Every structure is written in structure tokens, then in C-alpha cells.
Image (tube, helix red, strand yellow):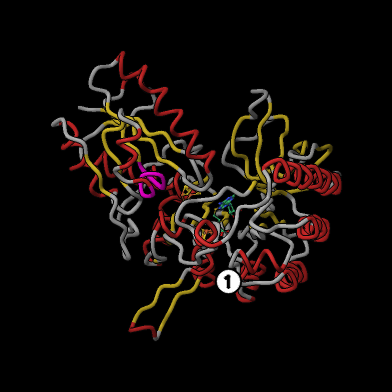
Amino acid sequence: MENVYIETYGCQMNFADSEVVGAILREAGYGLVQDLDAADFVLINTCAIRDNAEQRVRHRVRELRAAQNRQAGLRIGVLGCMAERLQSRLMVEEENVSFVCGPDAYRRLPSLLAQVREGQKGAEVELSTTETYADIEPVRLASNGVSAYISIMRGCQNYCTYCVVPYTRGRERSREPQTIVAEARALFEQGYREVTLLGQNVNSYRWETDGGRTAVDFAELMRQVAEVSPLLRVRFATSHPKDLSDRLIEVMASYANICRSIHLPVQSGSNRMLKAMNRRYTVEWYLGRVEAIRSRMPDCSLTTDVIAGFCGETEADHEATLALFRQVGYDYAYMFKYSEREGTFAQRHLKDDVPDEVKTRRLNEIIALQGEIALANNRREVGRDYEVLVEGESHRSRERLFGRTGQGKVVVFDRGDAAVGSYRRVRVEDCTAATLLGRLIDR
Ligand code: SAH
Ligand code: SF4
Ligand code: F3S
């Protein structure tokens, strides 16, 4: 039997896709190994979102030459968004790569690997308007047996002007709801206690039947998944502010097992920038959504993504982002410097004119502010009790476990008699900006 070693970079969608790839290859008779030395094929599932994401992968590919010198016959394949973006060019630029396979072509991996075994190179990069891998039961690769991803839709056609995803992931398409609910139910029966519904734009999910007369939208899908069991926590990522409906807020508020946590990428606090980014909402509209969430679910946690130094960004625009961060008070933020991507609207029509040192300074200001906000938010949690789903051992000490509150905050506590995969009440006693520290209080 030949063995495959899969390495994954990028977003949660990519991690979910690697689990589909694992299932396809296992079905085709390959072994999945955690150890590079035992592998015949290394598959690197890649991200193209920013230049540094790609540089990291290229570095890794070059580093793997040493392994190839040790293990004759070890072949490298690149999957995911970089494969889609660069196609065969990648095999010319990185000579030790034997094949590339884009995100909609994973069913062709067995034939691609067979071809590579014959000594040829290969590329499968066709995008699809229908592929959702709905019938494939993912191999839960790096799973803790407690939480799992369920991919519910693929692609994105929002065309934010800075973003490469519409080019690497293709058109938006949703997966049949019955298959999603069935997957959630099967996971629950296997002992999983949390599922995260995934898509690049998860809340524009829509499944139509009878020529559009009946439809399941994201709010309805959430309701159906939440109905699987009150003991199954349901999360989702990532939602676009423009598609965050009142009905979704209503459904979230009416199920205790739908987590009170929304990742709502804002990108900028300046209307001028939002327009240049083609985000299709204004700061006022965004704040209106935040207000709607908080008035219905006062304890709901909000997290975001932001880009510093997009084309034409002035100090005033940057100040507006800082002001928005203060106003919303996010619990966590993913913060990036703008990175120009080939083929995007911004690369073709806008000037990447903010000097790198200015981008860095602005990014650092956002990071510093967000650190203060997160710490202040966490300090307010001290003294509160939470129902925590125990997810595993703390990375620092085997004597301690960690879990998450319904708001998605990590709590570390002494293990006591708590079991991984159970719900326990924990009182928060201390915190850092990133973590809550607590104590078991229920028995
Ligand atoms: N679909 C999600 C986000 C996908 S990418 C959404 O629209 O919310 C994750 C984040 O990467 C984006 O939210 C954005 O903040 C960031 N990003 C995307 N393209 C980028 C670029 N060219 N430079 C810097 N950051 C970028
Ligand atoms: Fe990219 Fe915008 Fe689509 Fe998100 S919504 S993946 S940022 S184009
Ligand atoms: Fe990266 Fe592709 Fe995800 S570009 S962020 S891996 S969709």
C-alpha cells in the first residue's frame, strides 16, 4: 500500500477540504500517515490569500527536497488555492512538485496520483459550479473527537476588490441540506459535541427545490442542525455582514446550543475604503447589524477581520478603523496588512500606494488597541460562571484542561474529574488578553 501525508495551510475550509481529500484517497486504497518518513506522496493544501502565505508554502516545498533526497520516489503535490491560482506554472517554478490539484478537482486525485506514479507530471485545476463533495464522509484528520467542521457551501462571488478567493474557489454553491443534517447527526452519534458549519460566505447559503418555490436558507439550516440535539453545539464561519439576516439572529437567540459568537469581518472602519473594497455595506449599516445582534443577544461575542493599508488609505481612514474597533469592542480580531494579489480588481485598477512601513505601523496600532480591548473584555468575565465544553489538555500542562464557553472563549482549568467531551460549569477567576483561567464548580 502506498502512503499519503497531508499538510494543510490556510483557512478552516482548507482543513475541511483536507479531510475530504483524505477520504477520497483512503477509498482509492492509499494509507494516510502522520509521519513524513512513511510517505510516498506529500500533499500540501495551500492558501493564496496573501503573499506571505504563498512564500511560506514555497519555503516548505524547497525544504522538502531534503526528504526527497533521503526517500527516493517521494513525490510532492500541491493542492488548494495556490494550485488553482498558479496551475502548471507552479511545477515550473518549483521543480520538485509533481502535480497540482485545485479545490474542485479532488475527485480526480486517484487518477492524478496514478499518472504521477508512471513518472508524469499532472495538473487538475478545473473549477466547478456544482461540486460540494456532499456524498463524501470526511476523514477527521487532526480531530480531538469533540469538535468537527462541516463544509456547507463552497466558492465566493462577492469579488471584494482585494481578494483572490473568487478566482481560486470559483462560483458560490450550496450543499444539499439533508446531507448536512445527516453529517451532523452522525458526528453526534460518534460522540462529537460541536460542529462548525463552514463556507467562505456561510450566511448566503441557499438550497432551492421545485424550481425555487421552496428554499432552505442559512437561518433555516442552522435551525435544522440545532435540532439534532440540545447537546450538540453549533457554530459557523465566516459570515458576510451584508447577508446577516434578522431571521438568523432570531434563530440563534432561540436555541441555547447555537453558540453566541459571530465572526463578522469588517475590513475597514472607513466608508471610503469599504466602497473601494466593494464590501457593499457602510460603517453605519455594519453598526446597525451589531446593534441588532446585541439587542437580541447581549452576551454575544463578536470577532472580525481587518486590513491595514489598503489602496488609498489615509490617516483619517485608519483612525476611523481604530474608532470602529473601540466602538464595537471585539473579543478577537484577525489583523492583516494589505497584500496585492495578481488578477484582482485592486491589482488591475487601484494603486497599492501605502508604503510598507506605514502599513506596518497602522497594523501595529490596530493590534495594540485590540489587545487592550480583548483584555478589558476578558476582565469583565472574571467572577462569571460558564458552561464549558471540555476540548482537551492545555498545551502548557497535562494537569490542566481547556474548553470553550458558548461565546467561543478559551478557558483553562485544573482537570479535576472532568472528561474531554463533557460539559462542565467553570467559574472564571483570572485572565490574560487571550485566555480565561477558571475552576470547576459543579461537583
Ligand atoms: N470570506 C471571508 C474571508 C476570507 S479571507 C469574508 O469575506 O469575510 C480572510 C481574510 O483575509 C479577509 O477577511 C481579509 O481580512 C483578509 N484578506 C483577504 N484578502 C487579503 C489581501 N489581499 N491582503 C490582506 N488581507 C486579505
Ligand atoms: Fe474574499 Fe470578499 Fe469573498 Fe470574503 S467575501 S472570500 S473577502 S471576495
Ligand atoms: Fe486561503 Fe483559499 Fe482559504 S486563499 S483563506 S485557503 S479559501
Q: Which residues are magenta?
A: 79-85
In the displayed structure, 411 sits above or below 248; it is above
Residue at 13%, 31% (x, y): give it: 118
Picture quadrant of residue 443: top right
Q: Which residue position holds label 1? A: 243
Residue at 65%, 72% (x, y): give it: 281
Q: Callout 1: helix, strand or loop?
A: helix
- For the stretch drawn in magenta, the main secondary structure is helix
Q: Can see residue 262? A: no
**Residue 65 drawn at (x, y percent):** 35, 21
**Residue 365 drawn at (x, y percent):** 79, 45
In the displayed structure, 50 sits above or below 62; it is below
Q: In the depicted view, which residue is nearer to us: 295 or 386?
A: 295
Instruction: Decide whether residue 316 is among the magenta residues.
Output: no
Q: Quadrant of the N terminus?
A: top left
Q: Is residue 147 left or right of residue 408?
A: left
Q: In the depicted view, which residue is nearer to us: 421 or 110?
A: 110
Instruction: Decide whether residue 84 is among the magenta residues.
Output: yes
**Residue 73 drawn at (x, y percent):** 23, 22
Q: Is residue 432 left or right of residue 252?
A: right
Number of callouts: 1
For badge 1, the amino acid type reads Asp
In the displayed structure, 443 sits above or below 257; it is above
